Image (cartoon, helix red, strand yellow):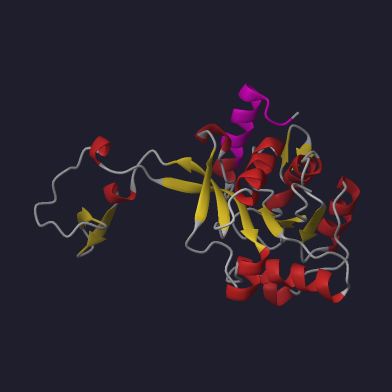
Amino acid sequence: MYRNKKILAIIGSRSGSKSVKDKNLIKINGKPLLYWIIKKALKSKYLDKIYVSTDSKKYQKLAIKFGALCPELRPKYLSKDQSKEIDYVLHTIQYLKKNKIFKPDYVVRLQPTSPFQSSSDIDQSIKKIVNDQKATSLQVVSESTQPPFKALKLYNKKYLKPYYSSSKNNNVINRQKLNKAYYRSNIIISKIDFLLKKKCQIGHQSLIYEIPMIRSIDINNLHDIEIAKAINSLYKFLK
């Protein structure tokens, strides 16, 4: 709890990843990704409840073993590739309300596939959003090495042109002349009143909390796993 605000963490961990089977159980430094994100959440000073949302009994048992709460399974219709994240977040909140377990002021969405997030990232982000009454959410981000206006797209199946620019000249634009761009590093904190009213996690007044690029990896495929292992071997983020 921070400044008398009740804070809920929801860790999304479905079992049906097609890119890598049981992706959330991939081991780095001898422990599965699910273990590491629960460990970071448990070390937070301000998280009051830590729930894992999963469709898997195996994941459920592991989540409880690692110290999180996971009293029920997520319905299968909320666990498909096309399922929206907001739906399982709302499902967890509604379960807590229905069973009169916990009514949070803020919801912190975490993911096992971003193992290098720190407990400090969580806590400093919580402090920042709680201290800004106008904010609808906060997103933990890293600066992108390439602004989106540098992106290219294919036309006529063989030619390249800028993805966003309508310029006919198609000249190269120096990166230094473009505004900085950021990508989400997979912590989202939402103000509960806004989330329930708008059925939206982010909204138009989303605060920034920036972390170094080296800790912002989001594991989606085998290549990412090898990169994450190499980073951890060098920096010892998971120990």
Is any part of residue 103 visible from this angle?
yes
Which residue occupies the extreme left position in the image?
A: 169
Question: Who is closer to the viewer here, 72 or 50?
Answer: 50
Q: Is residue 234 magenta?
A: yes
Q: Nearer the viewer, residue 177 or 203?
A: 203
User: Quick one: which residue is furthest to the top in this view?
Assistant: 234
Residue 236, position as x, y percentages in the image = 68, 25
Which residue is found at the position 77% from the left and 41% from the top? 44
Q: Is residue 165 left or right of residue 72?
A: left
* Depicted 128 relative to depicted 17: above or below: above
The residue located at (14%, 51%) in the rendering is 170
- Front residue of 138/171: it is 138
Instruction: Give the percent coordinates (x, y) of residue 65.
Output: 90, 49
User: Magenta part mainly helix, strand or loop?
Assistant: helix
Q: Is residue 230 left or right of residue 90?
A: left
Let me know if residue 114 appears in the view: no
Q: Can you say whether 177 is above or below 153 in the image?
A: above
Place of residue 177 in the rendered image (x, y in percent of width and height, measured from the top left): 23, 39
The x and y percentages for residue 167 are 13, 56
Quarter where residue 96 is shown: bottom right
Is 228 rendered above or below residue 127? Answer: above
Which region of the structure is painted magenta?
A: 225-238
Query: Quick one: quadrant of the C terminus?
Result: top right
Residue at 71 percent of width and 38 percent of height: 119
Magenta stretch contains residue 217? no
Q: How many marks?
A: 0
